[in-house]
Image (cartoon, helix red, strand yellow):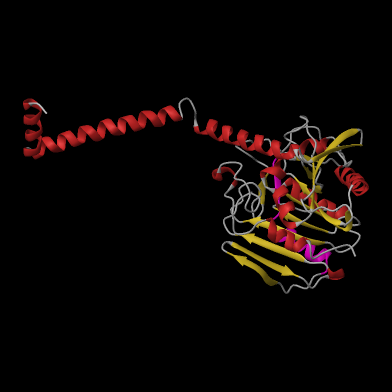
Amino acid sequence: MDRAAASGAAGAGSNPARRVLILALLLTVGLGAWTARAQGLFSGQTRQERIKQWLQQKGAQADAEAENDAHFSIDYGGLTRKYNVHLPSDYNANTPMPAVIFLHGGGGSMRGAYWEGMNHSADKLGFILVIPDGTGRIADRYLVWNAGQRGDSACCGYAVKNNIDDVGFISAMIDQLKAKFNVDSSRIYATGISNGGSMSYRLACELSGKIAAVATVAGWTEDRCSPSRPVAVMHVHGTGDLMSPYNGGQTGVFMGGQKGACVTIGPNGQPDQGPQHPCLGPPASETVDTWLKKDQCSVNPSTVYQNGAVTCVSYNQCAGGSEVEFCTVEGGGHTWPSGMQYALVSKIGPVNHDMSFDQMWDFLKRHSLK
């Protein structure tokens, strides 16, 4: 060290004010460098763009997993309908195995099953996973189901306006599935969220000879529901659902859109081809009450699952050995249990991790057509 440097160092050490000034300068330079690096990492990306990029990455991952599954199509109602089949690792062609039909939410596609990890649930729990697509103007996205009518409205959109027979398609799909794989015909189940949950209920109403039980998230039941037998149903609903409110109200409005998903049904029973409108969904308790009456259940529920924000009560004294289970997720959003936060919490509410499809499977597997 030369004399000038030594003198400067000594001066800095002997002058507290100068020492503070130098420390402040060093911190400023350091923070400035860190900020520059952070800005470089996210240069040119808004929050919305980062979310979009993340969703694209998740979509690519889902597509890669879907490629490993079997792909089928069936001509029905003048359309070519598609579905995937995921066989669990322990599938044995010599042993009948139960099947679960996963019905994506409105505006989604079969990709949703992979987003929610249903293929991994099939591997873990031991069932054949069947993943059909709804219909829409675009072949593989923004798809919906014709989930039936409530009052003078029906959901959802394209499928209603075009009188798509989704019940008939799924019935034909089940027949084809049984011809290709060793499916236990007495243990075929349906599950889904939102529009897919409502479609699951429609299958319970109109295809009860093939569907053993259903487990739904944030769905509702059509008015014209006349199952041929008592059907076991499980209803899961979050009190923080911003898309299909737990206590009832306007549904089907997403990401600030005002178009809505419901279609007016005219006096002639045909869908109006004019603008769609937001649906008015019933309270979750009303959907449960509907099935308590249909299954002739005694109103003496027992708590069968409680963990964190989730409480499930079961009405298990019902006709024909059926059962109605109602799971309330305190603060839970319009999301699959332990699933993916596919949109902002401020838009749909949060994912809850206090239950998963494991609990839904525990319910389904208790019931069969035998």
Q: Position of residue 12 (x, y in %)?
A: 10, 35
Please tell me whether residue 286 belongs to the stretch shown in magenta.
yes
Vertical placement of 80 versus 182: above or below? above
In the rendered image, the quadrant that contains the N terminus is top left
- Locate residue 198, reporting x and y percent: 76, 50
Q: Quadrant of residue 143?
A: top right
Confirm whether residue 297 shows in the render: yes
- What residue span does the magenta drawing correspond to? 278-296
- Residue 26 picture location, percent across and down: 23, 33
Left or right: 48 in relation to 214: left
Q: Using the image as rendered, state which of residue 119 and residue 255 is in the foreground.
A: 119
Q: Residue at x 6, y 38 (%)?
A: 14
The front one of 15 and 311 is: 15
Whether residue 261 is visible, yes or no, is no
Residue 21 sits inside the magenta stretch: no
Q: Residue at x 79, y 35 (%)?
A: 158
